[in-house]
Image (spheres, coloured by chain):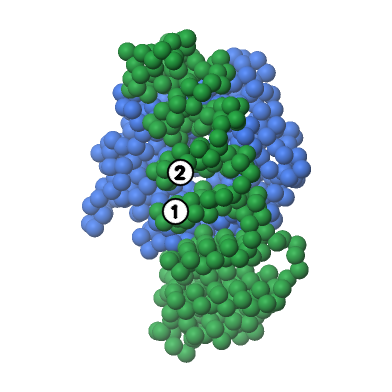
């Protein structure tokens, strides 16, 4: 006897056992009883397109056992919308579930469906902040946040403030850097470029680099900014030189600065200096990518040694 | 095919590796064969929503290990067909909603088993139905693809669509030019790609975007040096690769990162020997299987991507893998030539 077979609420439903399509199928049945029973009732209600209240408790039960079961979520959303349930209650139920299953993808899709139907982002920023306390790089949450910003046209100021708080907690959070780019540029694609924004963003990223010079996110951000505004990389030459200088090859504080300097020297036509910077990267500051740095040197016109692995791409 | 993790655990004695660090081919074959005998475990059933993809992962691993017949062909075809819906889509298991991801896995399995004809005999008009299921998910204005009727779009679904349709010889059903434009709009300031325009660069999504562009014949849109630099930066001092800056290494990125580098001709920008050592350290030498990192529980997902990664970097004794499809190159060549 089971939870559902003993419940009068479900007396009219004939549970549907799993049919794997063969006498000795590759994926035959041996569920644990509880899960197996709930699933057989789910199959039955789905087969009859049952949209009644009891389906909500059934789907809640299955989700509590297996939140990754995508079909259950889709069916639940359909029932909620059909019955015109109070969707705020759904969000209240959803919050602890999302906090417990950080890697779950279905929960965020479901949330998006519900919030879209509610037509209000109220409380979402607070909940996202709670999620980020556990994992500030959760890809599902960041995707959801971007959707929220677009869907409800959330203002830049509050977004930039939230990003700033996250970067204060962890200046290496690449997701937050990406979101910053999205807020400042991505959502305003096509707008004319404002020089004061360049100045503000450059200053912001440079301050972050002072905190942690060996952090690729703000360096990528700076490169992206200069490219976006069509400024030469040499704009930041004095800045980069603070972290790496060919005069002090043993005192390099950032391989990214050395990388930037190599590009700047190349642009200035001082290829020998560019090659020196690339050699330092290949030999000392980023040897695991020696082939990449050798390739960069090759692009400058310096041929690699004939036995260099750059010539043996396919050999193990 | 079970996606349950374990029972084995990757070795932890990483401090003193034996000189003969090697790939335990026989153990991995036995591990994959044993997965289906774990139906008395709840976790087997809790991973049912991934089953068809699990089968694809296990089968691909066996092919790359040189044991393509280690799972029963007829039973696999039966199971694949039992996951198919009337609308031409496949669910992860019987009774699960049809979804792009499992439809792609279904097609890849049939392709690997050279079973398109068997399939067509048993399911009337089957291939055409699949083609229409997939192509209906394209938004003709934006070029994007949804994964199911709920409409969420993701570059994963776009790649999956082009992957499956190209194997079926049905790319003409979709607007490839629009799809390419969409992928191009997902390129980020750092050279990578995400799930959609503006989404953070992620090695898994880069694989799907570069894979889609390769199938479409539009790799010319990729700034190879810039993307290659970002991808090669994923290698950490322990040899393993991460999927985003400042994240932990994980064996699955041995596939997503390295296949992307291979597609853009920059495979040699990572240290292959260090990567091979990292992957091999993630094996369970007794019970077989590969984990995400040393000391963790093995599973079939990390097993296939570890083996496929080793194949890409030319590790001896493995079949060559196609970096675009994550299937044996001999098979994709046969199908795409026909």
| Rendered view: B338 above or below A219 | above
Q: Residues within 10 Å of mark 1 (few under 14, many from 20)?
A: some
What is the secondary structure assignment of the residue under circle 2?
helix
Q: What residue lies at 48% left-to-right and 22% top-to-bottom?
A: A54
Quadrant (top left, top right, bottom left, bottom right) of the C terminus of chain B: top right
* Circle 1 residue: A130
Chain A shown in which color?
green
Task: Residue A239 in the image: state x and y as whole percent.
Answer: 54, 83
Q: Decide: marks 2, 1 in contact (CB < 8 A)?
A: yes
The one nearer the camera, B335 or B105, is B105
- Would residue B206 be seen by someone viewing this image from the given angle? no
Task: Residue A300 in the image: state x and y as whole percent.
Answer: 61, 76
The one nearer the camera, A19 or A83, is A83
Residue B48's quadrant in the figure?
top left
- Mark 2 or mark 1: name the one nearer the start of the chain: 2
| Rendered view: A83 above or below B225 | above
Q: Residues within 10 Å of mark 2 (few under 14, many from 20)?
A: some
Task: Residue B211 in the image: state x and y as whole percent.
Answer: 60, 46
Task: Residue A148 in the image: state x and y as whole percent.
Answer: 60, 51
């Amino acid at each position: 006897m089971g939870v559902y077979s003993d419940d009068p609420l479900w007396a009219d439903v004939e549970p549907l056992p799993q049919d794997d399509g063969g006498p000795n199928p590759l994926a035959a049945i041996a569920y644990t009883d509880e899960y197996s029973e709930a699933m057989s009732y789910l199959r039955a209600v789905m087969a009859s397109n049952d949209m009644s209240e009891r389906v909500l408790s059934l789907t809640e039960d299955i989700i509590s056992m297996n939140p990754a079961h995508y079909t259950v979520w889709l069916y639940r959303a359909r029932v909620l919308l059909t019955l015109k349930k109070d969707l705020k209650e759904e969000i209240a139920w959803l919050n602890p579930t999302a906090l417990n299953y950080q890697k779950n993808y279905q929960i965020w899709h479901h949330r998006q469906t519900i919030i879209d139907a509610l037509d209000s982002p109220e409380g979402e920023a607070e909940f996202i902040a709670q999620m980020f306390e556990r994992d500030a790089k959760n890809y599902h949450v960041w995707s959801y946040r971007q959707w929220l910003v677009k869907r409800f046209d959330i203002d830049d100021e509050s977004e930039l403030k939230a990003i700033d708080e996250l970067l204060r907690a962890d200046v290496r959070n690449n997701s937050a850097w990406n979101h910053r780019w999205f807020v400042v540029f991505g959502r305003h694609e096509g707008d004319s470029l404002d020089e004061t924004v360049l100045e503000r963003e450059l200053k912001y990223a440079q301050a972050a680099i002072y905190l942690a010079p060996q952090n690729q996110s703000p360096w990528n951000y700076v490169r992206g900014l200069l490219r976006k505004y069509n400024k030469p990389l040499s704009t930041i030459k004095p800045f980069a030189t603070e972290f790496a200088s060919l005069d002090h090859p043993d005192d390099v504080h950032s391989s990214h600065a050395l990388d930037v300097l190599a590009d700047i020297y190349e642009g200035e036509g001082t290829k020998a200096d560019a090659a020196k910077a690339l050699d330092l990267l290949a030999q000392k500051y980023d040897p695991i990518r020696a082939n990449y740095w050798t390739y960069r040197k090759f692009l400058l016109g310096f041929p690699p040694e004939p036995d260099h692995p750059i010539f043996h791409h396919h050999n193990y | 095919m079970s996606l349950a993790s374990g029972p084995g655990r990757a070795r932890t004695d990483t401090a003193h590796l034996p000189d003969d660090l090697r790939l335990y081919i026989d153990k991995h074959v036995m591990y994959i064969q044993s997965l289906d005998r774990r139906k008395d475990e709840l976790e087997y059933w809790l991973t049912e929503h991934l089953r068809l993809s699990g089968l694809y992962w296990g089968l691909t691993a066996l092919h790359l290990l040189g044991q393509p017949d280690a799972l029963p062909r007829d039973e696999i075809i039966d199971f694949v067909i039992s996951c198919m819906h009337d609308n031409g889509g496949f669910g992860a298991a019987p009774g699960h909603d049809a979804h792009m991801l499992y439809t792609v896995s279904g097609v890849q399995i049939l392709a690997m088993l050279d079973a398109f004809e068997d399939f067509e005999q048993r399911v009337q008009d089957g291939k055409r139905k699949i083609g229409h299921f997939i192509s209906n998910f394209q938004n003709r204005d934006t070029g994007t693809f949804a994964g199911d009727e709920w409409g969420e779009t993701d570059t994963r679904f776009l790649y999956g669509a082009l992957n499956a349709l190209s194997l079926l010889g049905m790319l003409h059903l979709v607007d490839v030019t629009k799809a390419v434009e969409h992928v191009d709009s997902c390129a980020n300031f750092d050279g990578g790609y995400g799930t959609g325009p503006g989404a953070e660069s992620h090695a898994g999504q880069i694989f799907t975007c570069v894979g889609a562009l390769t199938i479409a014949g539009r790799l010319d849109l990729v700034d190879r040096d810039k993307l290659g630099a970002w991808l090669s930066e994923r290698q950490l001092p322990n040899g393993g690769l991460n999927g985003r800056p400042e994240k932990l290494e994980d064996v699955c990125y041995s596939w997503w990162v390295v296949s992307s580098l291979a597609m853009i001709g920059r495979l040699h920008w990572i240290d292959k020997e260090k990567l091979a050592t990292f992957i091999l350290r993630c094996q369970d030498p007794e019970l077989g299987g590969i984990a995400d990192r040393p000391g963790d529980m093995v599973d079939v997902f990390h097993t296939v991507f570890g083996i496929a990664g080793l194949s890409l970097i030319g590790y001896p004794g493995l079949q060559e893998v196609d970096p675009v499809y994550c299937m044996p190159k001999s098979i994709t060549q046969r199908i795409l030539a026909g």
